[in-house]
Image: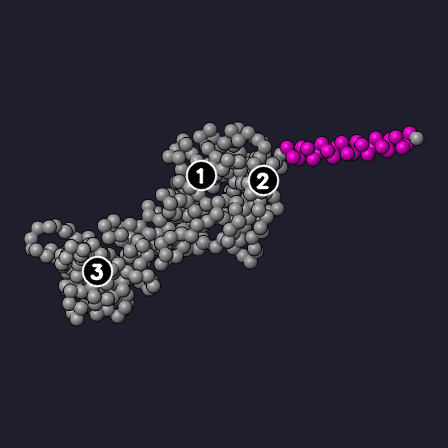
Amino acid sequence: MMRFIFAVMGILLFIAVLFVMIAKRDQLFMRGEKETQLIIDLQKVKPETWKPIYEKGLLEVNVDDDDVTEWLFLYRNQGDAGQIGGVIYDAQNRPKDATSLALPQQASAYLIPYPLMPDYPPTKNQGYLADDAIQCQGIFTDDRKQEDSGKAITGDRLQFRGIYRGRTSRVSIFWWMNQQSGYAGALAYTPGWFSVSPDNPYWPDWPKCGEKSEPEKIEAIWAWEPQMDRSNICRRVAWRLEGMQFVADYEHSDITFCSGLASGSNKLLLKEPAFPEAQVLAYLLKPDPARWKLPDSALSLPGPAKVLRISEPVITDAPPERPVAHVDVDFLSAGSERHMVWTVEMQPPAKINDTVHWRIIGARER
């Protein structure tokens, strides 16, 4: 009888210990469908000026090639200009040497913060992740596929799209180095905006961080930098990921319309630009004799040109009756660089529902 009682007590004790272990485990983490929050006081592990972007604070992430989930914390730094930064918290069994951290150790033993941006290594000390809003994706650069777990952002790269006034102004990519160095990163920033296509200036929208997406590996992006507001003209620059940094190729950049009406595009170019330089640029990108006052005298080009530089002439309403503007242009045509002055004449409206327009009347070498 006593043996039976001891057996029952042993079973009950085992169940009690198991219950306690499960309860302690559940106290560590609270899991949601797409976002996860550590059950800790975030105020004790972050600077006071960091305000979380997401209400629940933390997102599950695993881009360091192990089986353990880490925690991505995206925040708005109200101690600076209110820009968006990020840090990945790694719950480790052993404390990391605090002297090797880029930021001071921020409480909670064994919860190691690995800053993304801002940070201080050479490839990561260029700024923040975003200004107004942020989107991100995890991606594998090899043949592995994303797991639709609905919980963690997974991959061997973490890609961020930083949004300013509705457009992508910052692109950053991170990958795991080692326990001491944390995550390496590369940042591209433009005062204009970025696209993933040289012809289309609009970046396709991504889901919010942690939501299901179809990621595409970023190796090259294009910056669109406004040059002339009145004619909607931009300089288009390729940025390529080379090693551990984005490199801008200004040497081979060109001039085009900010709307993406570029050489080789199937879209219609401006029909009647309001300013002379736009008429010249439209002709160079898609030669059409109708842009000349006398179509038969149009300068013959073998095809679309690559425009390197274009001037913005001063226009006045002083005599003569039909103002003439001179537009300096440097461009490549059939592999040869040309430097020309284009003369463009204003054509006043002939009737009440006409608009002012311009016609090219001549072009000569400078």
Q: Magenta region: which residues?
A: 2-27
Front-most of 107 and 363? 363
Q: Judge whether residue 11 is colored magenta.
A: yes
Q: Residue 14, position in %: x, y? A: 78, 34
Front-most of 140 and 288? 288
Per the model, the C-alpha gap separating discs 2 and 1 is 23 Å
From what the image shows, is residue 82 above or below residue 198? above
In screen coordinates, is 362 left or right of 126?
left
Q: Judge whether residue 284 is colored magenta.
A: no
Q: Which of marks 3 and 1 is in front?
A: 3
Q: Is label 2 in contact with label 3 (beta carbons under 8 Å)? A: no
Query: Which residue in the structure is indicated by mark 3?
Result: 280
Query: Which residue in the structure is indicated by mark 2?
Result: 32
Q: Residue 356, position in %: x, y? A: 17, 55
Residue 91 visible:
yes
- Of labels 2 and 1, earlier in sequence is 2
Magenta-drawn stretch, dominant element (helix, strand or loop): helix
- Of labels 3 and 1, earlier in sequence is 1
- Label 2: which secondary element: loop
Residue 366 visible:
no
Q: Residue at x 29, y 50 (%)?
A: 226
Q: Which residue is drawn at 52% across and 42% down?
A: 182
Callout 1, which amino acid? Gly
Per the model, the C-alpha gap separating discs 3 and 1 is 43 Å
